[in-house]
Image (cartoon, rainbow, N blue to C red):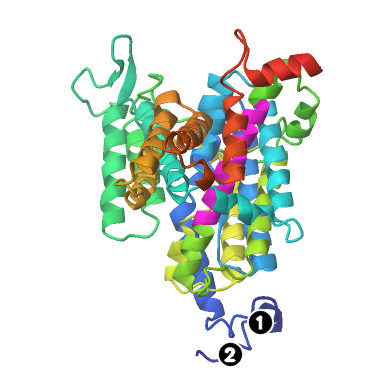
Amino acid sequence: MPPADTGSTGDFLEDTFGITKAGSTVETEIRAGVTTFLTMAYILFVNPDMLSIGGIPFNDALFATAFAAFVGCVVMGLWANKPFALAPGMGLNAYFTFAVVLGMGIAWEVALAAVLVEGVIFLILSLPQVGWRTEMINSIPKDLKIATGAGIGMFLAIIGFREMGWIVDNGATLVDLGITESFTHQSGELWALICLLAIAVMMARGMKGAMIYGILGTTVIGGWIVGASDPYNGVAAVGVGSMDNFDAGGLFEVAGLPEESMFAAVGALGDLSRDNLGDFILVMIAFLFVDIFDTSGTLYSVGRQAGFVDENDELENSDEAFMADATATIAGALAGTSTTTTYIESGAGVEEGGRTGLTAVVVGVLMLSGLLFAGLFKAIPAFAAAPALVIVGAMMMKQAGDINWDDKEMAIPAFITMVLMPFTYSIADGIAWGLISYVIIKIGMGKMDKLNPVVNGLAVLMLMFYVGPGDQSTFDWILSAIL
């Protein structure tokens, strides 16, 4: 066990985090925090870029992203004393923008309200006095939870390739390869490919911060120097010679408080009506499910890596960790971002020796410092940011190998869950029909007694959103009778 730090560490850090007792040092915890930050800092520009497509001002989304990450990491560090970092989750931000706002036509303010309600419910479920969170997690078959994560990875990948210009609409085949001409040095599609492969090579070589290095390198060379065009909208990036704001005052512009998104979720709750309440509830359930599953999987995965999970598969301070996640989601929704969740990249910091909440606090402070570089983040072109979606999607797909593909009763619902997410552009549809098909197959096999009542209830509830009298869903029919 390393000797206790007394000078530079101070009694406060030792009393707060128990660094020596955890077998660590202040220097190790700080290094672990920096390592984790480098592996997930890409979210500071990818998330605002994605949310701005749905109408949230970039500055507002950037502030909300950094603020949610800061709140989540600090609460996780001080309350749960665990080295787990949090930030707005990849996958749910894409679902928020492309499926909910653009696809379903739900105003982004109302979508934020769904995130807010989801966070409050998650917090209530996580209270030790309630204890429903564990029951809900355990009621869903393991393979369906795995399929949800893998499906979100596929969903991210198709959005990433679309933003890269590699996938486009096709009236005959639905989608097609977007490359119709030879590459030039100013083709955004080419620089997107270079960025994707550069990140892949750096990750394969075990380089920390590969994602952020690839994105920033492509931005500087492909966007600022070469001036390559955006593959999605055809707008040319501005080279260094004529780049707007190419000065300290522009690139290092500080993000201010949100002008439109702050507390927009609260105001939007009053705008709910019979016409959009059904969609609101379906979206909220999807956010809640993915948040719970994603957080649970990440906490236990990284927790095992750090030695926080005992022989009974119990995670130390699990209630505090889950409540920290829920608190961050609430804070993020109030500020203006989609669901906040615990990041699997926390494992990089654990690998560096991080064992206490000081690691998480360091990440939170570094995330908040990203507000100092708002101008820099705004200057990152889509072809440099989109490859990150594909890379994250690839990393999320590895869990699909843990599905029991030999069990057809489970494999088929898991497959439906996975493929419907990218094919329908909806995480909610994938979760819903995965559960519905699972219950129906079990009933068809005469194994209704093997079904969990919670799963049965969820399947019936979700079916109500799709089946009903006439051109109404059952849920809408019930609402019309009540309201």
Picture quadrant where residue 417 is located: top left
Q: Is residue 55 left or right of residue 391?
A: right
Residue at (52, 25) in percent of width and height: 99
In this rendered view, identify the residue nearer to me: 189 or 378.
Answer: 189
Q: Which residue is disc 1 drawn over?
A: 14
Picture quadrant where residue 102 is located: top right
Cβ–Cβ below 8 Å for labels 2 and 1?
Answer: yes
Residue at (75, 14) in percent of width and height: 480
Residue at (65, 42) in percent of width and height: 64
Query: Mark 2 belongs to which amino acid?
Result: Ala
- Local packing at callout 1 (Cα closer than 10 Å; few below 14, some 14-19, many 20+) is some
Q: State the image coordinates of residue 451 (x, y, percent, origin top left).
A: 53, 44
Q: Can residue 54 be spotted in the picture?
A: no
Q: Is residue 45 left or right of residue 324?
A: left
Q: Which residues are magenta?
A: 280-297
Q: State the image coordinates of residue 462 (x, y, percent, origin top left).
A: 59, 30
Q: Is residue 216 left or right of residue 453?
A: left
Q: Secondary structure at mark 1?
A: helix
Q: State the image coordinates of residue 98 (x, y, percent, origin top left).
A: 51, 26
Query: Mark 1 belongs to which amino acid?
Result: Glu
Q: Tell me which secondary structure the magenta stretch mostly adopts.
A: helix
450 relative to 80, above or below: above
Q: Earlier in the sequence, mark 2 or mark 1?
A: 2
- Local packing at callout 2 (Cα closer than 10 Å; few below 14, some 14-19, many 20+) is some
Q: Please tell me the numbered disc located at residue 4.
A: 2
